[in-house]
Image: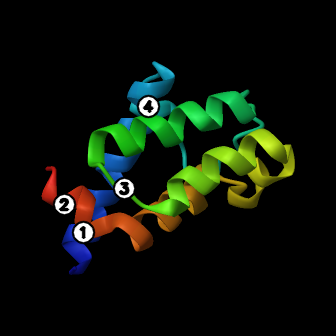
Amino acid sequence: MNFSDMGSVEREIKQTIADCLKVELSSLKDENTFYSLGIESLTFIEIALCLDDKYSFGDEDIRALRTEAVLDRKQLFEYLTVGKFVDYITSKYGREVLAHT
């Protein structure tokens, strides 16, 4: 995946998160923490479900992320900012996202 593709994937992932949260894309800044956006563990699970539904990751990591968010609220803050979470999803699932764009 080249640099241009990575930018497209990051934008696509952010747009999916914004759609899931029913907010404008412009309100999701890389430096925003999930806490500052009012996102709690159940909302984080909804984000994981939206991403998985749209891109069909079919990977244990998404299921684990949903489960851990329920079981351990601190897991939510592992990806402290929107940017860090988007980077994680891009590095792990970038090819799957590109395949659906």
Residue at the (29%, 64%) spot, across then down: 7
Please identify, in this view, whether the residue under mark 1 or under mark 3 is nearer the observer.
Answer: 3
**Which residue is the site of mark 4?**
18
Q: Considering the numbered disc 3 on the image, is that residue within a helix, a strand or a loop?
A: loop
Where does residue 43 sit, x and y in percent of width and height? 64, 29
* Rendered-image quadrant of the N terminus: bottom left
Picture coordinates of residue 86, whole percent (x, y):
49, 57
Mark 2 = which residue? 98
Q: Which of marks 2 and 3 is in front?
A: 3
In the image, what residue occupies the spot 85% across and 50% down? 74
Of labels 1 and 3, earlier in sequence is 3
In the rendered view, does 13 fall on the left or right side of 2? right
Q: Is label 1 in contact with label 2 (beta carbons under 8 Å)?
A: yes
Disc 4 or 3, which lies upstream in sequence?
4
Distance from Cα at disc 4 to Cα at disc 2? 18 Å
Residue 58 got which mark?
Answer: 3
Q: What element carries label 2?
A: helix
| Circles 1, 3 touching at the beta carbon (< 8 Å) | no
Tell me if residue 29 comes above or below residue 96 in the rendering: above
Q: What residue type is labelled 2?
A: Leu
Between the residue at mark 4 and the residue at mark 3, the CA separation in whole angstroms equals 22 Å
Q: Earlier in the sequence, mark 2 or mark 3?
A: 3
Label 4 crowd (10 A; few <14 / some 14-19 / many >=20): some
Q: Which amino acid does label 1 sit on?
A: Arg
